[in-house]
Structures are given as structure tokens and as C-alpha cells.
Amino acid sequence: MTIYEQTATGIWSVDSPLSDYYEEDLPLQIGHRDLVQDPIQQRMFVILLAVTAALLIFALLILPGLLRNNQAQISENVAPQAEAAVVENVVSGIGIGGLSPVFSPEVQHWAPQIIEWSAAYNLDPNIVATIMQIESCGDPQAGSSAGAQGLFQVMPFHFSTGENMLDPQTNAARGLAYYVERLEQTAGDVGLAFAGYNGGHVAAGTTWDNWANETQRYFTWSTGIYEEASTGLTESTTLQEWLAAGGASLCDQAANQLGLQ
């Protein structure tokens, strides 16, 4: 018979919890006490805590006081400025919203409309009344030899086709729009704009020596009346001079037209 010689085969050992030599691979756990903290990191952490605490103290205790003081200072600065602005408006007459009593009764007759028109064109009511005073003294039917028409003596070429030149609303719209143009041309110079209303844009862009005699007189009357109306006077010396120089007849005509006589 054949004898087979047995040879030992290799043996593989298997690690298991039952093996005497089994060693389980446990996860490495390190507690915070096992770590050695860097002294620099410790100091930075302390500094951060200190800064945070300081900011909290500032926000809770100091900042509200600073804000109150700053608000009080702003109020103190704004109040005088606001008061000065009010005084300036009163002196200049701009934005007062009322009509000076210096104007003649014929012009005062149109006070509600003057206030309305001045608001529509952002003008001082005393400017509107000054123009009406000199141009027509409140006569809506006034006309001149040059062809000027109505309350504000507007030339026909300023109207659109079909417009009623004597209609007070239409006449005021055309006349005041033209004055606003002259006011813009002269960078807000009320006196030069008055001159331009009478003598045209050329007069508004020049000076007294270049004006016609009529424009010089118009400038004198208008600026004098307006200044006295704007300063809170109850009577205008310039207006009385204008009446004596021939304006009285114009006002008599207006009073008759308005039924005030």
C-alpha cells in the first residue's frame, strides 16, 4: 500500500476576543486635562475676555450717557439755526403766507387769489401784490397803449391761441410765469426780476444805466414798495409817492371796476 507521508500545513491564527493574546484596538481618548495649554494662548484668552467685558461695560454704562449728551448738543445747535431761519423769512417776506397791509384797497380785494397764486408759483405774496399794484392796481380790465392786458398787464404774445387774456386766473398764470423766469435768470434777485418784468430779459441782464426811463421808474417803485411791505410796515411811503405820481387815477379806475366806490 502506498503510505502517504503527512506533512504539517500552515496554521493561521485568528484574533478574537477569545484568544489569550487578543488585544482590542480601543480609540484613543484624551481629556482636556491631558493637554498642556500654551501660555501665550492663555494670555490671549484672558485679554479677549477682558476686552469683551470692557465693551459690555461701555455699551451698558457709558454709551447711553454719551448719546444723551450728543443729542442735547445737537438740539442746542439746531435751535438757534431754526430761529435764525424764521427771522430771515420774516424779514425777507418769503414764506410768510400773508399779505402786507400797505397795499391799496383795490389790491387787497384780490388777497385770497394773491395768496393762491403766490403758492402756485412759490413766490412771496408781497411780490405778486407789488406787481399787481403797479401794473393795474387791481383792475382786471386794464389795458395799455402798448397792448398789455389785465391784472398783470401781460403782452398778448405770452398767451396761447384762444386764451382769454383778461381772465384773472389766465392773466396771473402768464404774468407770474414770466416773472419767475426773470427771477431764475437773475439768480433770485427780486429787484432785477422786477426790472425784467417791465423791460424784458435784456433789462434783467443789464444794469440801471442801460435801462429805459420807464424801467428805472418801475424798479424804483417796485423795490421800494416791496421792501416796505416785507419789513412789516403798515404804510408804504413809496406807494404814497407812486399814487401821487399818477397811480391814484389807475386805482380810481380799478375801484370803479370792482365796485369799491
Image (cartoon, rainbow, N blue to C red):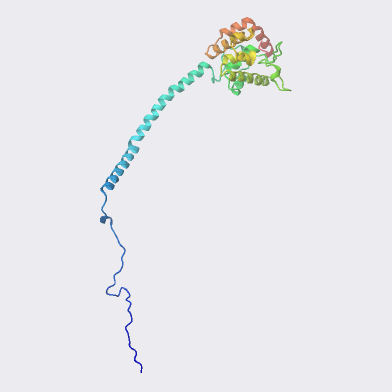
> Could you tell me if residue 45 is visible in this image?
yes
Q: Residue furthest right?
A: 162
Q: Residue furthest top?
A: 244
Q: Quadrant of the N terminus?
A: bottom left
Residue 226 point in image, percent of width and height: 57, 13
Q: Is residue 141 above or below residue 49?
A: above
Q: Please tell me in which quadrant of the rendered image residue 210 appears.
A: top right
Instruction: Identify the residue shown where x is 48% and y is 21%.
Output: 85
Task: Tell me if 82 is positioned left or right of 64 in this view.
Answer: right
Q: Is residue 248 above or below residue 60?
A: above
Residue 2 point in image, percent of width and height: 36, 93
Q: Please tell me in which quadrant of the rendered image residue 171 appears.
A: top right
Residue 213 versus residue 174: which sits nearer the camera?
A: 213
> Could you tell me if residue 131 is visible in this image?
no
Q: Please tell me in which quadrant of the rendered image residue 14 appears.
A: bottom left
Q: Residue furthest bottom?
A: 1
Q: Quadrant of the C terminus?
A: top right
Q: Is residue 249 above or below residue 14?
A: above
Q: Is residue 8 above or below residue 131?
A: below
Residue 195 point in image, percent of width and height: 61, 13
Instruction: Identify the residue shown where x is 62% and y is 7%.
Output: 243
Tag count in the figure? 0
Residue 255 versus residue 50: which sits nearer the camera?
A: 50
Instruction: Identify the residue shown where x is 41% and y is 27%.
Output: 74
Task: Tell me if 40 is positioned left or right of 101 in this view.
Answer: left
Residue 241 point in image, percent of width and height: 59, 5
